[in-house]
Image: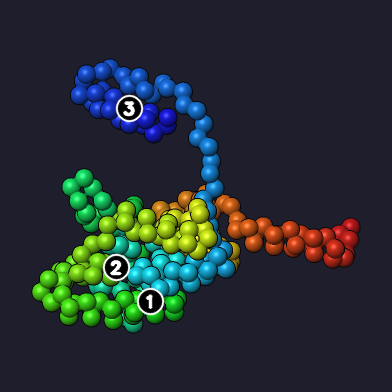
């Protein structure tokens, strides 16, 4: 209902701009409250299980890099080799691939946020494997390979990977690994949750995820991983049992 109202509101607001209406009647609509759903986040053990289950699939290295850097779907699919740092030690996210009615195209990142993300060794190794595999495919396709796109994650001939196809494939791999409600966005959400769980400062997490400000990060990641909730209870109990000197 809220989505429908949003579309109608935009249409009627255009009518106001064109002088067809004096006011937007959709502005006065009383909408039902939107249910708040907590996003799914994988802890470190679940993340490892997912990556191990998908290790033989063609998107295995894509999943490793996605889990390790927290990039959005379009940002990962828009990566070029020119965005990869020396020895594959970092990625610079400067654009995003989107699907439109006219086809696939590159656009600016959300909030025009360009950021460079240092990578852990697992992701470095994954990018090196992708590079070796692509070099072989370039030789196979010869002049038919899309050298001009310079994509990191792409089809065998170097062309763009359709985002919706990647999304469906990741859902299927997640289900195979035993995770029924995990999507591609779960990788990004898990990355942020895991960093906070590991004690990484909120400003660092915010910058890594490409949020406009720290408040956005705090709002999205106000929840905790299940393991953190259990640990909080244990820490509270330990503190209650520990004798403390009186303060008076």
Q: CA distance from mark 1 to mark 3?
A: 46 Å
Going from N to C along the chain, the mark reached first, 1 or 3, is 3
Nearer-the-camera pick, 76 or 212: 76
Q: The C terminus appears in which quarter of the rendering?
A: bottom right
Residue 83 higher or lower than 4, as above or below: below
Say left or right for 213 vs 45: left
Residue at 26 percent across and 23 percent down: it is 16
Going from N to C along the chain, the mark reached first, 3 or 2, is 3
Say left or right for 151 vs 124: left
Q: Secondary structure at mark 3?
A: helix
Quarter residue 93 falls in = bottom left
| Residue 158 showing in the rendered view | yes
Instruction: Specify the color scheme.
Output: rainbow
Circle 3 sits on which residue?
8
Residue at 47 percent across and 50 percent down: it is 216
Circle 2 sits on which residue?
153
- Which tag is nearer the camera, tag 3 or tag 2? 2
Q: Which mark is residue 126?
A: 1
Find residue 204 and report its horizontal and vertical position in percent.
48, 64
Residue 197 higher or lower than 31, as above or below: below
Find residue 119 and report its horizontal and vertical position in percent.
42, 74
């Amino acid at each position: 209902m809220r989505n429908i109202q949003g579309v109608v509101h935009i249409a009627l607001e255009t009518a106001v701009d064109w002088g067809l209406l004096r006011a937007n009647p959709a502005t006065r609509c009383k909408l039902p409250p939107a249910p708040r759903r907590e996003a799914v986040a994988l802890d470190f053990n679940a993340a490892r299980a997912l990556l191990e289950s998908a290790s033989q699939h063609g998107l295995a290295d894509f999943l490793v890099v996605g889990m390790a850097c927290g990039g959005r779907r379009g940002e990962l699919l828009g990566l070029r080799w020119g965005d990869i740092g020396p020895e594959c030690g970092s990625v610079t996210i400067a654009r995003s691939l989107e699907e439109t009615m006219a086809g696939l195209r590159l656009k600016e990142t959300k909030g025009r946020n360009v950021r460079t993300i240092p990578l852990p060794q697992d992701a470095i190794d994954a990018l090196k494997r992708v590079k070796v595999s692509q070099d072989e495919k370039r030789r196979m396709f010869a002049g038919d390979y899309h050298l001009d796109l310079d994509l990191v994650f792409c089809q065998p001939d170097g062309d763009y990977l359709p985002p919706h196809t990647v999304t469906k494939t990741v859902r299927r791999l997640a289900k195979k690994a035993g995770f029924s409600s995990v999507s591609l966005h779960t990788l990004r959400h898990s990355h942020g949750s895991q960093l906070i769980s590991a004690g990484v400062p909120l400003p660092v997490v915010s910058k890594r995820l490409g949020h406009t400000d720290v408040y956005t990060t705090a709002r999205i990641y106000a929840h905790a991983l299940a393991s953190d909730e259990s640990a909080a209870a244990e820490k509270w109990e330990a503190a209650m049992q520990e004798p403390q000197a009186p303060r008076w």
